[in-house]
Image (cartoon, helix red, strand yellow):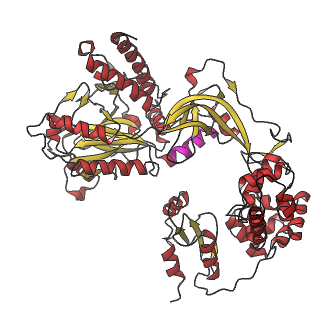
Amino acid sequence: MIPPQDRITQLRQEINFHLYRYHVLDAPVISDAEYDALYEELRRLEESYPGLVAPDSPTQRAGARPQDSFAKVTHPAPILSLANAFTEADFYAWRGRIGRLLADPDTPLDYVVEPKIDGLTVVLTYRNGQFVQGATRGDGEVGEDITANLRTLFSLPKQIPIDPASGLTPPPYLVVRGEAFFPLDKFELFNQAQAAAGERVYMNPRNAAAGSLRQLDSTITAARPLTLYCYDFVAWEGVEIPTQWERLAYLRAMGFPVSPDAAYCQNEAEVAAAYQLWASKRNEINYEVDGIVVKINNRPLADSLGFVGKDPRGAIALKFPAQEKTTRLLEVKVSVGRTGVLNPNAVLEPVEIGGVTVRNAQLHNYDDIQRKDIRLGDLVWVKRAGEVIPHVVGPVVDVRTGAEQIITPPERCPFCDAPVSRVEGEVAIYCDNPACPEQLVRRVEYFVSRGAMDVDGFGGQTGELLIATGLIHDVADIYFLSREQLLQLEGFKDKKVDNLLSGIEASKSQPPERLLSALGIRFVGSVVAGLLVNQLGGIEELAAATPEQLHEIEGVGPQIAQAVAAWFNDERNLALLAKLKQAGLRFAAARQARTADTLAGKTFVITGTLPTWSRDEAKAFIEAHGGKVTDSVSKKTSYLIAGENAGSKLTKAQTLGLPILDEAGLRQLAAPL
């Protein structure tokens, strides 16, 4: 067992290294959760051995020393960080400790809860309403002068008040604390532009914000989509505002950007409820947040409580479970999708993230691997956000040993050994062999699924077994299976076989747009399939159409048109269609009588889960009333129909200012006047 003094020394060295990586180089090599664990171990040891506490311990200061490339700024008051809590029980324990310092432990306290934004802390100085200086937090006592860079932020008031009609007079001296950050949507676009220009791609929004504000050339900062939220006073003259909630209101009235998500809580139960709400919606907001900051609303009382080491007692950071950690990339395995796309997947050294052990993660595509320079054997950042499949964010380059191996895309399919191909303008790599056994499994699985031909009793394992035994070589073979063949398979008894054959027969009555969607043509989902069939009249007419004719259909772009035409020009696919027609499937669209024209001339996009309709039912309703349904939101969209769990389409519609209806609103819109 390591003696406490040696372990404390070891922890201080390790934490100081990570502080330097995080605050100075903007290139951390461990996650926040892993850093928090190290810090918490050191804090507990120093608490148990107070004689070993040193003034330069990481627990006694707020960060790392500033860089030498900027002028130094001494802050008018310490810019301190907060102690962390990781559960509601930790929060209530903090409240209990506060109670012991009060005359009456049961004194009611109210609070302000603010998002703990993962950005870069900035300190803004104003004299007589003029912005005169901006600095980083640095080590809490001395920061870096980044005034010129901060002046480029549109969200930062250069003069206060912004609105003279407010009647406010700017104080003679005011120092404000805030957080600069990248909105998530703009961060993604920024990284794409950086990659296209051959410039540095940032691992996360926090690093991008820090790197942008530490540019020696402020014109670089000006070109980056940084924004800012302010949340506290550091020093001031001529104004006395005794509560945190009033301080936020004052900052907002003076023209400072303040988070609209800050909330007032009357008691501890409301704080706990706010924490649960934030934890549930953290992946829905447009900036990185790793917890909430809980502040006692009564600021004189909070300030009177003093400090524990570097941490003020009057506030605490209540952090969410970790979503990102580092682990080792052991292997890259390839899977084949139903359209032939080769998908690289990461095999990882198991790591616990958010209560789940993660062993596999997405690598997106080989262009992304190359852009991020991810190599076999790398220590990599892995992120798991909510129920989203974990993905590899990028490598920790600085800890490479030289044994790591560059990952190259395959030249042949690993399952059928056919040459792979790339389509110009796409990042995907394809296996174009329709007889590829792995591709066929995925294709059959999709063909019989509920959203396609909906073959009752036909699961994924059934498809794998039928392919392995040689009973089906393409999706059309499903319709030529005999009862005798199926009864010879292990586990297939009379009732199971009868149910499967009944499901196969029933699927023959599916409309042609369902069949077209089930074929797995690139870019052709249910909505595009409906557009094509309804416009042209059926699958045979579609097969004869040119790319130019297809492109003329509203909602069908050039990429879709080329993909569809190429599929129907392949002799193997035409042979498949001939077998499907021989089996008795529907190729011609039934002309649906309109019940009304109340939606004529209007274009709709459907997203999310509707209360009583499937998307197909909602689409049929719209078309029966004369409207059109397309798959993508644009300025030409008349209405977005949004159900539960609406995603990016809802965001885009809101950005474009489009009308948004729910199912009831659609019914009302279609009703005759």
Residue 175 visible somewhere in the drawing: no
Residue extending furthest left? 103
Residue extending furthest bottom? 673
Above or below — where is 559 with respect to 172?
A: below
Q: Nearer the viewer, residue 70 or 86?
A: 86
Q: Report x, y in % for residue 342.
A: 74, 43
Above or below — where is 225 with respect to 652?
A: above
Horizontal relation, residue 547 to residue 610: left or right:
right
Q: Report x, y in % for residue 668.
A: 49, 81
Q: Quadrant of residue 473?
A: bottom right
Horizontal relation, residue 467 to residue 305: left or right:
right
Q: Residue at x 67, y 64 (%)?
A: 451
Please check the rendered image and state whether residue 201 is part of the magenta-colored stretch, yes or no.
yes
Residue 304 visible somewhere in the drawing: yes
Q: Residue at x 44, y 28 (%)?
A: 34
Magenta segment: 185-203
Q: Report x, y in % for residue 110.
A: 19, 48
Q: Report x, y in % for residue 137.
A: 33, 30
Please check the rendered image and state whether residue 447 is part of the magenta-colored stretch, yes or no.
no
Locate the N terminus by quadrant.
top left
